Image: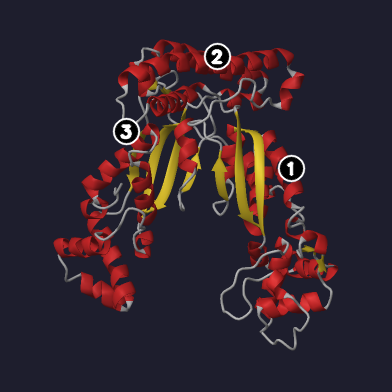
Amino acid sequence: MNDSKNRGIDLSRYVSNLDKNVYAIFNLPEEVIAVIFAYVSRSPASFRENLAKLLRDDELAVGDSAGGMATVYSEKASRFHEKWVVGYGHSSVAEHAVAHLGVEKISRLASAELELANPFNSFTEYSQRYQRPTRGDFYIPPQLQDHPEAKQAYLRLQNRAYDTYEALLKGLIPYLSETLPLQEGETDRRFATRVEKIAFEDARYALTLATHTSLGLTGNGRALRDTLVHLLSSRHAESRNLAREMEREIGTVIPTLLRHVQPSRYIQQTRSGLEAPDLPQPEAGQRGTASAGPSARFIDMPDYEEALDQLCIHLFIEEYQAAYEQATAAIRRLSIAEKERRMDAALQHLQLFDHPLDLFRHLTYHMEMCISEANWHQLLRHNRGTHFSYGQPTVERGYTIPPHIREAGLSEIFAEWMEQADTAFDRMRTSCPSAAPYCVTNAHHRQVTATASLWELYHLINLRTSPEAQWDIRETFRQLLDELKRHHPALARYAQRR
């Protein structure tokens, strides 16, 4: 920094140091940060020098009442955004502006759609595994106002969901208290808390997708804009309304970057123009069928030796600076056992929280899962790049009865409730279709296909097969791990490390 050039400008209010090549930036509105980063991409000057220039030229309003924070960005900054973000589509500028949102009292259906809208957002959501819901906390589709009888049936259903939840808790807590062993050093109070949380975890399968949840969201301007476009193109009015509420609040932090947000005509026109295929029907329907857990399998995975070949090629390129042709020629001289030893050497030093080398991202696997909505909501979080195709909420594919509910002799209560939910879904589908998905419970199954790299599978298997993982998703990834061990033994060896 040129001290004489910037004399009288106190940059220490905005950057953590004035003389090092790495520094933190603070006390600036998000759009100001994005503007100055954009300046850097078009100017040899540094972030600190461009910031000093804006301050020297009175482009930023600095309020002493705000502790020296720059609280207003200028018309010049706004015009810059208009030119590079809106006019020229230089959307990378938007990645440097970040907004944090609290989103409360949305349905589980809408929260899932929000979490799927863009992979670059970060979420922390209210957990039904650890907290008890409140009666009456559920979403009511506004379209029901035009269908009084359907609305009353819908309200009865949501209240029955809570009644069933309470009945399951009443049966689960004494059963678990009698059957679960006391952990070493566990006090009676801690044991009672643990029992209650396990009961919450299983009883929540009776709750519907209308049940309210809350979450915290962090995203950059580009990811948030794409999120809003996705939600505005949703089938569900709740998600479309949520998008406009989010747009309003994000606009208080990064207003310029969210201009001209509209639904995607491409998504809408494609969806309306697709004709339903004549799908072959299974011999016996799955509706009303109860299972003790999920089913998961690989529908496409690389040939084992070809997988070893590809990984060894990338390993030689990365570690030994080989050209592709050199690496290919080298691996042709190796036996399968020698290739497996190479993979073992590349994986054996993984520790509990490590990720494998990036070369494992080159290998891709495709999976099919039939999982409960409760399981699905967990699958959406903590993944590092899994891509999903998924059906809409339905009652047609059966449901999961949590094992503790079976063991506690509560299956009849649960099955009766699921039959009521199925009946309500059918009624809503006829009288008010927009309300039908909100009658689906956490126990109902959803069909999902997923694509993930081996790198991602290592992350998911390590996280989701740990003893701390919830039983439903743990079983999902145990099935996938077992299949991976059978077909790709050397590659599966270090996937589970907890």
Residue 327, numbered label: none
**Tell me, what colour scheme is on the image?**
secondary structure
Q: Residue at x 35, y 37 (%)?
A: 474
Quadrant of residue 66 within the rendered picture: bottom right
Q: Residue 99: x, y in percent? A: 67, 54
Q: Which residue is mark 3?
A: 185
Along the line of sight, the residue nearer the viewer: 417 or 49: 49
Q: Amino acid at mark 1?
A: Glu
Eye-nearest disc, 2 or 3 = 3
Q: Secondary structure at mark 3?
A: loop
Left or right placement of residue 157 versus residue 416 in this view = right
As displayed, is residue 66 above or below residue 427? below
Left or right placement of residue 293 versus residue 25 in this view = left
Left or right placement of residue 459 versus residue 212 in this view = left
Along the line of sight, the residue nearer the viewer: 174 or 12: 12
As displayed, is residue 342 above or below residue 456? below
Eye-nearest disc, 1 or 2 = 2
Residue 163, numbered label: 2
